[in-house]
Image (spheres, rainbow, N blue to C red):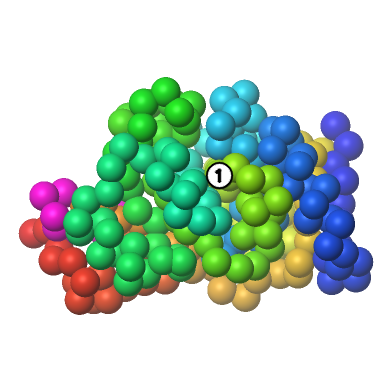
Amino acid sequence: MNTKYIDLTTEYDDNIFTELGQELKKGKIVVFQTDTVYGIGTNAFIEDACKRIYDIKGRPAYKPLIVLISDISMLQEIVDFISPAEQKLIDAFWPGPLTIKFKKKENVLPDIISASDEYVRIRLLENGIAYRLIKEAGVPIVAPSANLSGSPTGTNMKNIITELNGKVDYILDNGTIANDTTSTIIEVNNEKAIIIREGKISKKEIAKVVPLKD
């Protein structure tokens, strides 16, 4: 396939976001900068598109995808409920680099996103390229790191192009990212927090808001 390459460092245009937002909504595969690293994204509601991401990355089926949203109304559309502890974490850290594992609504998102379990991992964005694309698309977006499974996290555009050119529909280049720290992923169980992956938000910061599970 022919990948369309767009260099935002030289041709920044609002129309690009409008066009690519609609392409994402249709299920096209787009590489873009998120609030942490570069992601490889598509419409979270389209199963075949999400499967393409697994296939492109060589990602094992047991590894779930993170869903990015641009406002709380999207969260309410895809999760079953929000516990008091989850709400405290939302109030303290969202929008921001905290991914929270919620009980998902049935028959809304494709099972492949959650690796066939009953949860969905979600992060709320506030600004930046990914935020603008989600706003334009009007749908939640899945966006794992833009790299082949087993390769370094997607921060270096040269590496991203080498690995993904010809496999995705669009690459949106905003330059190389200096920091490869990913989001913190957290689960709440009996109103206590379980750190699945510690990233930009530390365990110590989490513990100030919600008690940690022993």
Q: In which quadrant of the rendered view does residue 15 lie?
A: bottom right
Q: Where in the figure is residue 117, as x and y percent of width and height?
A: 32, 30
Disc 1 designates what residue?
A: 140
Q: Please name the residue shown 84% across and 71% down the image.
A: 9
Q: Is residue 111 visible in the rendered structure shown here?
A: yes
Name the residue nearer the viewer: 79 or 203.
79
Q: Is residue 82 above or below residue 61?
A: below
Pick out the residue farthest to the front: 73
**Please, what is the dominant secondary structure of the magenta stretch?**
strand
Q: Where in the figure is residue 63, as x and y percent of width and height?
A: 42, 37
Q: Where in the figure is residue 32, as x and y percent of width and height?
A: 70, 55
Tell me: 164 left or right of 145.
right
Instruction: Give the residues in magenta.
Output: 189-196
Name the residue nearer the viewer: 153 or 84.
84
Count of marks placed on residues: 1
Pick out the residue farthest to the right: 11
Q: In which quadrant of the rendered view does residue 120 lie?
A: top left
